C-alpha cells in the first residue's frame, strides 16, 4: 500500500475497473484482486469450516465475506492517504485496490517534508486504529464464534499491514516518512528519495530472507512463501523505480527548449518530396524537421521522416510532401519559456511523439520526446 504521485500528469497505465467514488475519490479494482479474492475465500473458508464445523458452502460464503472486509480495510487505509492529501491541497486522481493491497494516486508530490510525512503516515494510522478496534472486539466477543473469528483475522491483518507499511523503505509508507525526514534535514528531496529507496531494497531482501527462514522452520506454508516472495519482489521493483525517478528528476533543470527543439525547415504545400529534400541539402538544413507551409507561410503540417524515407527514390519527384505529412492541429504546443518541470507536466498530460515549441504565435522548433528522454536518462537504451 503506497502513494504514487504523478506529479506531472495522468497515470501511465489504466488503474482498472471503476467501482464508484468514496468522498468524491474514484475507486478502481485491479483484475489481480480476483486472484486474491479466490485465494482468500478458499483458504479462509476452509479454515473457518473446520474450526466451526460449517458446511462447505457456508464456509466459503464466510471466506468471501472476509475478502469484502479486507477490501474495506484496504480502502480505508488508502482513504487515510487520500483525504489527508486533499486536506493539504494535493489533488487525488483515485484509489486502486490490487493483489498486494492498494495505492493512492495523486497529481503532485507533497510541497513540504511535513505534509509528506503526514500523508504517508495517515494510512498506517487508519490500519492501526482498525486493528485496535478489532482487537477489542476479539476480547469482548465469545470464543469460537463466527464474529470472533472475523474480528481476530481483521485485527491480525490490519495490525500487520500497519506495522509492515511503517517499515522505513520505499515504496512503503514508512519509506515516504523516511524520505520526508531526510528531505527536511538535507533540504534535498531527491536525496531523501534515493536514501529511502535504497533502504527499501534492504527491506525487500530482509522480507525474502525472513519468509524463507519461516518456511524452513515450517512456521508458514508454501503458499505463504510464494505470496511473501511476491511482496518482496514488488518492494524491490518499487524501490528501483523510486531510485530512477529521483535521478531523472534531478535532471529537470537541464531541460532547455531552445537547445532541445529541432529547427523547422518549411517548404510550400504541394512541393515534390525530392525537391524539398534537395532544397534542404543545399541549405544545409537536411537534419532539420521538414515542415509544410500554406500560401501565407504558416506551418500547417510536419513531414513524417519515417514515411518519407519509405518512399522509393524514383517515386519522390512524383510524391508531394503533403502525402507524407501530418497536420499540426493534433500536435500540442509548448511555450519556450517553461521550466523543466513544467515541460514534463505538459508531456505527461498530453502524450505524444513530438511537440511544437512556440514563442508567441511563432513556431520556433519541434521537441521530440525521444530527445527529452535521452537528456533525462542518457545511459538508458531507448527503443527505436
Image (cartoon, helix red, strand yellow):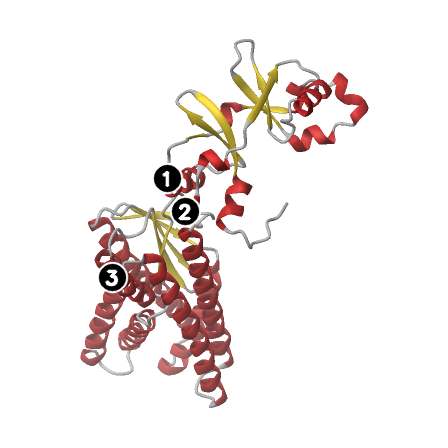
Give me the residue at 29% from left, 82% from top: 144
The tag earlier along the polypeptide, 1 or 3, is: 3
Q: Which residue is mark 2?
A: 252
> Can residue 38 be seen at all in this image of the molecule?
no
Place residue 342 in its image quadrant: top left
Nearest the viewer among 329 and 136 is 329
The tag earlier along the polypeptide, 2 or 3, is: 3
- The secondary structure type at the circle numbered 1 is loop
> Can residue 132 be seen at all in this image of the molecule?
yes
- The secondary structure type at the circle numbered 3 is helix
Give me the residue at 37% from left, 35% from top: 338
Placement of 243 over or under 155, stated as above or below: above
Label 3 Cα neighbours within 10 Å, binned few <14 / some 14-19 / many ≥20? some
- The secondary structure type at the circle numbered 2 is helix
Q: Which residue is mark 3?
A: 184
Q: Which residue is mark 1?
A: 339
Label 2 Cα neighbours within 10 Å, binned few <14 / some 14-19 / many ≥20? some
> Could you tell me residue 307's position as x and y percent?
68, 30
Amino acid at each position: 500500500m503506497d502513494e504514487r504521485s504523478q506529479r506531472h500528469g495522468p497515470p501511465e497505465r489504466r488503474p482498472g475497473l471503476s467501482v464508484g467514488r468514496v468522498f468524491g475519490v474514484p475507486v478502481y479494482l485491479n483484475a489481480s484482486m480476483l486472484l486474491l479474492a479466490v485465494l482468500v475465500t478458499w483458504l479462509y473458508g476452509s479454515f473457518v469450516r473446520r474450526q466451526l464445523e460449517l458446511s462447505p458452502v457456508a464456509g466459503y460464503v464466510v471466506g468471501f465475506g472476509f475478502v469484502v472486509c479486507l477490501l474495506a480495510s484496504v480502502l480505508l487505509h488508502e482513504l487515510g492517504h487520500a483525504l489527508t492529501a486533499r486536506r493539504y491541497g494535493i489533488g487525488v486522481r483515485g484509489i486502486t485496490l490490487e493483489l498486494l493491497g492498494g495505492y493512492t494516486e495523486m497529481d503532485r508530490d507533497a510541497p513540504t517534508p511535513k505534509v509528506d510525512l503526514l500523508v504517508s503516515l495517515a494510512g498506517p494510522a487508519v490500519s492501526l486504529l482498525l486493528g485496535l478496534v478489532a482487537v477489542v472486539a476479539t476480547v469482548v466477543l465469545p470464543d469460537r464464534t463466527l464474529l470472533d473469528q472475523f474480528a481476530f483475522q481483521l485485527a491480525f491483518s490490519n495490525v500487520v499491514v500497519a506495522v509492515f507499511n511503517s517499515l522505513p523503505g520505499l515504496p512503503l509508507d514508512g519509506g515516504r516518512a523516511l524520505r520526508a525526514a531526510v528531505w527536511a534535514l538535507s533540504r534535498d528531496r531527491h536525496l531523501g528519495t534515493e536514501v529511502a529507496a535504497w533502504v527499501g531494497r534492504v527491506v525487500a531482501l530482509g522480507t525474502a530472507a525472513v519468509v524463507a527462514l519461516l518456511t524452513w522452520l515450517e512456521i508458514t506454508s508454501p503458499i505463504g512463501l510464494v505470496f511473501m516472495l511476491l511482496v518482496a519482489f514488488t518492494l524491490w521493483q518499487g524501490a528501483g523505480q523510486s531510485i530512477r525517478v529521483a535521478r531523472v528528476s534531478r535532471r529537470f533543470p537541464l531541460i532547455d527548449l531552445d537547445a532541445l527543439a529541432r529547427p523547422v525547415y518549411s517548404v510550400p504545400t504541394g512541393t515534390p518530396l525530392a525537391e524539398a529534400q534537395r532544397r534542404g541539402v543545399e541549405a544545409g538544413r537536411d537534419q532539420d524537421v521538414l515542415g509544410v507551409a500554406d500560401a501565407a507561410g504558416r506551418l500547417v503540417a510536419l513531414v513524417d521522416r519515417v514515411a518519407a524515407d519509405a518512399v522509393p527514390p524514383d517515386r519522390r519527384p512524383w510524391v508531394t510532401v503533403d502525402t507524407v505529412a501530418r497536420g499540426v492541429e493534433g500536435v500540442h504546443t509548448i511555450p519556450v519559456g517553461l521550466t523543466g518541470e513544467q515541460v514534463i507536466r505538459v508531456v505527461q498530460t498530453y502524450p505524444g511523439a513530438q511537440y511544437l515549441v512556440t514563442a508567441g504565435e511563432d513556431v520556433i522548433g519541434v521537441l521530440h520526446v525521444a530527445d527529452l528522454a535521452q537528456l533525462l536518462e542518457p545511459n538508458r537504451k531507448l527503443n527505436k
